Image (spheres, coloured by chain):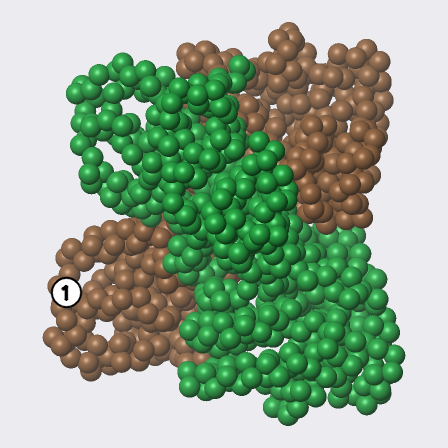
Chain colours: A brown, B green
Amino acid sequence: MFEIKARDGLARMGILHTPHGKINTPTILPVINPHFSIITIQEMLEMGAQAFITNSYIIYSDEDLRKRALEEGLHNLIGFDGPLMTDSGSFQMYVYGIELDPMEMVKFQRDIGSDIGTIVDLFSENADYATARKEVEETVNRAKKSMKEKGDMMLACTVQGGVYGDLRRECAGELAKLRCDVYPIGGVVPLMENQRYADIAEIIIESKKELPPSRPVHLFGAGHPMIFPMAVFLGCDMFDSASYIKYAKDGRFIFSDRTVRMEEMEEEICNCPACASLAIDELKHMEKEERVRVIALHNLWQTFMEIRRVRQAIREGNLWEMMERRAYSHPSLMEAMEVIKDNKKWLEKWENVSRKRALMYAGRYSIHRPIVYRLQNRIMKRYEPFFEKTIIFDEMEKPYSRAGWLKRVKANCIIESPLGPIPIELDEIYPVAQSVFPWNIDMETERERKRACSKFYRNLVIVGMDEVEREDENYDIRKIKSIANYQFGRGAGDALFDGDVEIIKSKRTGKIRNVICNGKHVVSMRASDGFFTLKMEGGKRLHSFFPPPKMRVVVNGDAASFIKEGRNVFARFVVDACRDIRPYDEVLIVDEDDNLLGVGQSIMNREEMMDFERGMAVKTREGIQSD
Amino acid sequence: MFEIKARDGLARMGILHTPHGKINTPTILPVINPHFSIITIQEMLEMGAQAFITNSYIIYSDEDLRKRALEEGLHNLIGFDGPLMTDSGSFQMYVYGIELDPMEMVKFQRDIGSDIGTIVDLFSENADYATARKEVEETVNRAKKSMKEKGDMMLACTVQGGVYGDLRRECAGELAKLRCDVYPIGGVVPLMENQRYADIAEIIIESKKELPPSRPVHLFGAGHPMIFPMAVFLGCDMFDSASYIKYAKDGRFIFSDRTVRMEEMEEEICNCPACASLAIDELKHMEKEERVRVIALHNLWQTFMEIRRVRQAIREGNLWEMMERRAYSHPSLMEAMEVIKDNKKWLEKWENVSRKRALMYAGRYSIHRPIVYRLQNRIMKRYEPFFEKTIIFDEMEKPYSRAGWLKRVKANCIIESPLGPIPIELDEIYPVAQSVFPWNIDMETERERKRACSKFYRNLVIVGMDEVEREDENYDIRKIKSIANYQFGRGAGDALFDGDVEIIKSKRTGKIRNVICNGKHVVSMRASDGFFTLKMEGGKRLHSFFPPPKMRVVVNGDAASFIKEGRNVFARFVVDACRDIRPYDEVLIVDEDDNLLGVGQSIMNREEMMDFERGMAVKTREGIQSD
């Protein structure tokens, strides 16, 4: 069972429950060799390891180990009472051409008590399309059979398909139907080794498009932290690594942005516990065995630290920035950013409404962030001009409406921000006010914002300042209507704020806090991101105005009475939901006859609500009976 | 006395000799408060500190401390027998409006035995131009007087001038005449605090344009590692920091790319010795005093590690990459890159001929690297077409001449690389072969290379492949002549390779190794960067061909006989040198009558040779008498 605790778009912090305890994701499972290990389990636990992966094939093929594993169980053999995952030997089969009985290996993993076993999938590296397609079919067949034999063991069914995006999608789609416990993405090790990060990005994206969001995704064999921010951003939850030891044997130090050979290292450039007290010369003169151990320790420290930095970034909501900055450390990572750029429309579906922190421009990919795509798109589709004439302004100090006279101009005031055209009324919504750009933006950002602007101006009458009056007094009304249209859809402003409107502002900041219509509290405004939270009265107005399925989360009859009283909506009660709902959107909770039950904030998008068997889908703010 | 051990353009690894020992630069001097210190000197030495800075004003203004300092000496007072620098109280005067007698303070520093004292300069923060100008004059006056009173103490004379580039230059120029021991750049603390990195970059550049290269430059009060790569790249050698303790008191953790408040930290994102064994929750629940100490330790560990990473980058020759990547961590650092971009012509004077490692594209500023400016400029000015017709090719796999048929095309083959137009004959020189770009380059790079190409094509006749024959057999001759022209100047190819030319290639790689003319070894070719090293015969040929001062380093009579025997040229013997000589260029060593004494590789450019009193200027390869 997998549950989500926090998210930043597709990236998530989750908990995977196994028979031997919880695994907090994202995380990495160090590979343990059942024969010998130069780093102890205790040492790895201190670094942050929570679970390990070992190779069932190695155990199976050693008579003594096999016997002990079957008798004492895997956990006793390894000497660890927490979560253990096993790999099946697919990679060994592929590399060394070993023959294995796929079902026998699954049963073996089950019988030795692995918490998470893995199917024996077929590894398509450089296979041609026809071969890769056959291998996908066989992998899916094995997965089907294996699911029947897994018993109480959790089973990981690996997505294959080589570098063919459509095969990856097909494979993921077929495996999705089986409701497996974990979905590894396989066959990426050779791509990692050749720094084909663009291929890896595409493979993850195509797989994720079909995999059920309620299941953790494991990027098999990806143990270098260079890939972590990107892989987690694209929705990977777990990694495993033998890299720490492989690189150590080769005298290579892993860092989050590169690998450094020992002989190239002339300064003590690491502070980790393995390195801090060691001079470079001491290291270079160590016995090889001891040195390999030191470097392996270093590699694991760096690896776990990077995982924690990714986790911190998810909490802060700035994983994109982390990923983009990391991309500049290698041209091949920049190629991967191009793939991500091309998928922004899909990424937008998973994108949070807003974030705790400002959007920091990190370079030429920032303009392609899903949140910017949403901003430009919504302004294009949902903006309703108030005046016949439009005036265009250059980027200026934020928030734009600080320049008080602008609010009185009797024209649509559009600011050409680096994010695209921004109507002045929207100057406080995320990420308009909450973004930091340098004065010198790159040419791609310049081109993108110009494109967005000229598209936006198409049906507007652009005039100069001398052609308009400056005595409009309805700025606040324009503002709340514009935000409502942006947030809920065209027409929402008029529907919500119909009647005798009273706008209550903060005495301290002068900012809008609440809107009352005909004496009823309709919406509040969040200071952090400038968006509205719906009160029940607001929900009722939008419910009458928008026909279903717009804004709706439909729950089944069993849950209706609880929700009316203000209880939260759990995913398992959701029978349908509007496709336009995004994480942290305001939603209308209705029963199957479209009776309004409550209003709340969604935690998930539609795909997630429909897929998750556990966890909260909507945090109910008000139920209709608590009104 | 300051000497240089390694360099990457303006950035250098040096040794500053003080009465109490050596300081390896670049480095940072932690600020020690003579009243109390929560981190011991021993602890800081273990982190990598070599020297400390303390405030002589604090000692002077405390009767007890003053008495002890005068009696026991500064080193006993502080309890450290290594290099100690003292600040003068200028900053305290500025901030708290304290009045000090400038000469009294210099004498006091001298009398307590400071290794490096500092003048009482005037700190112009937001002063208008006229005031800042007066303050510069007064600072220069004080420096003049102070130099007479310094005794055996080394004296640091601080460059001021507010944010006015021309005043910084003027101040630096006046102070340069005094031949001070250290040149701090002052007045940057408020700029650091407001992240005005572009202003800081400009101030450093304008100061460095006039400061003597033989003296270390200290960026006063810059203690956050975010600025280190840029400041060192621009020629700063020393930093000092009270930031570690100031930030700690405020609960802020310093990282190389940002600052994180304790309350924002939810994961253990640091592995340094202060943090590694500590859970975030433990830290948050500590007593304040203990917590401040832990954070201060962390801040110093991070600070010293970053200094070591900068040092490693200088050794590897990839400080630009480090600086550019760091720039993407904050929009204000990107603004600073714009300033650096505008100064590429000046930066090129200090730029190494080549580097150990490939040039890695790190984003949209890479095309503005001084080495790329040199490449485009030299190809523009020094390329001599061999044929009437020219064919243009798109970027292709490197080295371009791997496609053997290209070598036989009877036309000038120009490849439109991301670096600009590259004649095929130059495909193996640095950084053409030794550079890594992604396939998708940014639009600014695209524009820059297109500009360089169209400028280059102006006098060429561009044709299609069907208009040329493909049976030229003189590729190797074209290649060696083109490289010679690029490296030494137009006409060098014909002058060097005149007569019966024999080209010797490596049996293993097939690459050109040596060129023999009329039986004499003229040049060798370095495999690492594709450039020639001059043999004596090559030197003679270029010496007759190029009139002085071209390629010359002129030494005084005393040194002549030693150099003839093959001894190296030390800077103090250089009386003049060609302005076009760049670090690691091949040079002709001559006496004052332009008699050729030897050939060698310069370590310095002209400004450095003329300024340094110590250190090697030219590594002599052959003296005329060892010929």
What secondary structure is marked by label 1?
Answer: strand
The answer to whether residue B29 of the structure is visible from this angle is: yes
Q: Is residue A137 left or right of residue B19?
A: left
Judge whether B246 appears above or below A89 on screen.
below
| Left or right: residue B354 compared with residue B89 | left
Q: Residue at x 41, y 11 (%)?
A: A130
Residue A490, picture quadrant: bottom left
Work out whether B81 lies above or below B623: below
Which residue, given by chain and number where applicable, does mark 1 sit on? A462
Image position of B474 with respect to A579: above or below: above
Counting from the top left corner in percent of width and height, residue B588 is at 49, 42
**Nearer to the camera, B357 or A85:** B357
Q: Position of residue A465 (x, y in %)?
A: 16, 74
Where in the figure is residue A502, as x and y percent of width and height? Answer: 34, 79
Residue at (41, 31) in percent of width and height? B496
Three-letter amino acid code of the residue under disc 1: Ile
